[in-house]
Image (tube, rainbow, N blue to C red):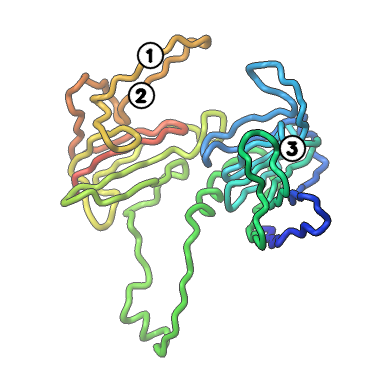
Amino acid sequence: EFEFTIGPIPFQDGLGKEVVSRFSTDLDSSSTWYTDANGREMQKRRLNYRPTWKFNSTEPVAGNYYPVNSRIFIRDESKDVQFTVLTDRSQGGSSLNNGQVELMLHRRCLYGDGRGVGEHLNETGLVVRGSHFVSLDHTSNATVLHRELGEALMLMPWLALLPSNETYPSYKDKYNMEYAGLTMDLPPQVHLLTLELLGDKKILLRLEHQFQADEPLNTPVNITLDNLFTAFKIAQVTELTLGGNADLSSVHRLQWNTKDKEGMGMGPAWNGNGSGNVRQVLKAPGIVVSLSPMEIHTFEATIE
């Protein structure tokens, strides 16, 4: 873990400044790096390249910067080694030279770039504090690590302290010091994304598969929901759209003709076919849902 504190950025010399953190390695990354899309699927990036048109590089730095929501990494395929940096906030990142990873931490611009915004980033007295988490490992190990660590950093517990005259034994006797909300551990691929009370005996439940198809632990996973939680049992579930505002069975997706002939569809999380506008309800016992790589499924559940 690397912690940084930067600012205020001086401006008395009349020059704007951008402060970056640059990690240099001897890895042969072949001018290729990967950045995440909102903490989920990793996007392949190449220096001075765009996959759908011929790229004319007029901004060699800015033209190769990409959003980094939570992580960026490079790989040396010949050594089977991956160098990963996880961030604690969204930043801009790149790999401008072979074997390097660069992230922008802070900047102060005294003039606009003439691109139409009409506002420069001259924020006075701004101090930035943050952390980067760095790993170097074999590719398969590094993939599992950045998935699990990225989730842990996103949902890091907040510590709160308060004065008390009680001793630890007496405090422990009065209060519950441990609580497990699940009756069993979820598989490493699965993350409980949302658990929200909707009303009397109704909850909103989202489960996600954290790995993508070309990563380790990329197999589909079945989860039994009936007795998953310690505080209640699930009597029945209805799958909803991702936003949770409509039954999935009532949604009819448009079908597009694509060059690679891949279908653009969405099916229910449990085995079986949808039946048009008929509401799909699965009841206990035996509420089993399936999650494939990168899938998120949303349910309205009735509890008891």
Residue ID for mark 1: 255
Disc 3 and disc 2 in contact, CB within 8 angstroms = no
Residue at 65% from the left image edge and 60% from the top image edge: 126
**Foreground of the two, 109 or 100:** 109
Residue at 51% from the left image edge and 38% from the top image edge: 40
Where disc 2 sits, the SS reads loop
Q: Badge 1 local density, few (<14 within 10 Å), some, or many (20+)?
A: few
Above-or-below relation of 46 to 82: above
**Residue at mark 2 to residue at mark 1: CA–CA distance:** 11 Å
- Residue 115 appears in the rendering: yes
Residue at 71% from the left image edge and 23% from the top image edge: 49
Q: Badge 2 local density, few (<14 within 10 Å), some, or many (20+)?
A: few
**Foreground of the two, 32 or 178:** 32
Q: Amino acid at mark 3?
A: Ser
Q: Percent x, y for residue 295?
A: 42, 33
Residue at 79% from the left image edge and 39% from the top image edge: 99
Q: Is residue 232 left or right of residue 127?
A: left
The quadrant in which the N terminus is found is bottom right
Above-or-below relation of 235 to 114: below
Residue ID for mark 3: 95
**Residue at mark 1 to residue at mark 3: CA–CA distance:** 37 Å
Q: Earlier in the sequence, mark 2 or mark 1?
A: 1
Q: Quadrant of residue 249?
A: top left
Q: Percent x, y for residue 169?
A: 39, 85
Q: Percent x, y for residue 157?
A: 47, 62
Q: Earlier in the sequence, mark 1 or mark 3?
A: 3
Q: Quadrant of residue 75?
A: top right
Residue ID for mark 2: 266
Q: Amino acid at mark 1?
A: Gln
